[in-house]
Amino acid sequence: MYNKVETNMNFVDREKQTEKFWEDHDIFKKSMEQRKQGETYTFYDGPPTANGKPHIGHVLTRVIKDMIPRYRTMKGYMVPRKAGWDTHGLPVELEVEKLLGLDGKEQIEEYGLAPFIDKCKESVWKYKGMWEDFSRTVGFWADMDNPYVTYDDNFIESEWWALKEIWNKGLLYKGFKIVPYCPRCGTPLSSHEVAQGYKAVKERSAIVRFKVKGEDAYYSSMLAIAEMLRYGTVSFSDMYFFSENVAKAVTDSGIKCNFSRAITSFEDTDIENLQSFRESEDIVKRFHNAADGRLKIDMSLHAEYTNRRTIIEQFAEKVRERGLRAHIHLSETKKEHEECKAKYSLTPTQLFYKCGVFDVPTTAAHCVWVEDGDIELLREKGVTAATCPASNLKLGSGICDVYKLLKSGVNVAIGTDSVASNNNLNMIKEMFLCALLPKGLHNDASVVSERDILKMATVNGYKAQGREDSGAIKAGYKADLCVLNIESEHMYPQTDMINNLVYAADGADVVLTMADGRVLYKDGEFTTIDIEKVKSTVNAAASRIISEVKKNG
């Protein structure tokens, strides 16, 4: 029965003879037919992806996966051996991206999802023949002629059926697991995907969860409003959270405000699914033009880098449909500006332009890194650039070229960017910085006059807010006033009061602030704000939050 084994046997030739014997006599099929009546033993095997070459590491896994079904078959079990191909996953998409010269989701969408999927389906079979030869060589028995394919509708539907059954049996639960994440791909990564060449990067971010309450937001807003009134600000624009609390603070204090709830989304979805958008819709209905028109509601998209392109496009459509104004952050840092260019082959300005955001009146905060072509688009669409000199300097973001913007005909207003990135809301100081920086940037003392600066701080800001009846002392206009004490030494000689206001005045010189004919601040006293209560309440809230953070590590 047994042939003598030669001592000089060539094992490779012997393997090939055995493989040929199995194939010629259809041994695998016969072994299955002999056990049709046996008890079924199911062995679940994670299938390979056929667009990747088999390597030496697969030899061990294929042998182990073959050994167990063989053993059970020898014990008399019926062991189905259906081959499979994993045709989903990031590796497939990345290989096709490289093949087509694409970079990221946006370029895939421009190429077309249907043709891209077709290319992926072609790609997964790239090394199918090599896998089949490899499997036969190592003696891996499986039905290669009738495999299951994970992109097949029947397979996908069976997966969903299995998931539903698991749910019905109460075996599906919610858990939490920290996994690697690819911000470019917008997806978590498996250990296998990470092993394909991803690298860890350092990101200078600190994330702290503060338990801020609605009451905290109200009193913090009242404190900020008091500071603005103290320095002569009558109207401000803001994007934030706690919309209802901010609206109440504006109403109670008597100041004017264009408020918006900032929208952000790192996922492609229907914008109406976003909580931030639903809040925006709600405050438009409840507060737009409230408090005799002092409170106006805009819609805001935080920035390009905090939203997907699909969200930006939907945002533009929604703002246009509702006839509202838009508020965004634009090219504040070089990093965000250059990353947008790398991602879309467009600057942030060009992207917002193409998505239709600028089809409505828009205020674009910062504009530090806008390019010459961007400035022309801002001028064409009537976009207001809100420069925030102190904040941009403090954060090391750069300097907005106000002179170039004004020279090109762009409406430029002045902002503080809030105490979070500035530390105070002193508009007099911002005017001073805004006047000096262009001169140093261009080495020319004549650029951007003090009259330009005064317009930026008053009329241009009102224009950005859509308050065409404010910003001048004339019949029919709202009675908005900021009165300064001009008797201090630094305000003499009084030969050019506008020059003194921009280059010599101090926030402490403000003695009266009036909005819509109502005095809100006079000689150190607030007429609508209990400033001592506000300060003590904010201090207590800050202490509580800090204590909670320390307690929770």
Image: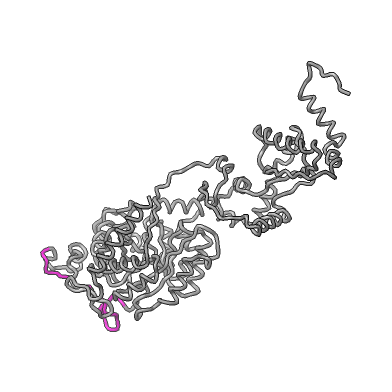
- The residue positioned farthest toward the top in the image shown: 7
> Which color scheme did the rendering employ for the protein?
one colour
Give the number of callouts: 0
Identity of the residue drawn at 56% across and 40% down:
195
Near-viewer residue (270 or 220): 220
Secondary structure mainly formed by the magenta segment: loop
- In the rendered structure, the answer to whether residue 488 lies left or right of residue 354 reads left
- Residue 44: x %, y % from top left: 70, 44
Q: Quadrant of the N terminus?
A: top right
Taking the magenta stretch, the answer to whether it contains residue 86 is no
Who is closer to the viewer here, 259 or 460?
259
Q: Is-magenta flag for residue 482?
A: yes
Residue at x-position 29% and y-position 74%: 253
Q: Which residues are magenta?
A: 470-489
Residue 371 falls in which quadrant of the image?
A: bottom left
**Does residue 519 appear in the picture of this structure?**
yes
Rendering coords of residue 161 (x, y %): 69, 57
In the image as oriented, which residue stretches furthest toward the right? 1
Asked if residue 464 shows in the view, the reply is no
Q: Quadrant of residue 108?
A: bottom right
Residue 406 image position (x, y, % from top left): 33, 64
Using residue 156 as the reference point, say whether residue 525 is left or right of it: left
Which image quadrant is residue 495 in?
Answer: bottom left
Q: Nearer the viewer, residue 550 or 183?
A: 550
| Residue at the farthest bottom position | 476
Residue sitting at x 58%, y 50%:
102
Question: Which x, y percent locates residue 249?
Answer: 32, 72
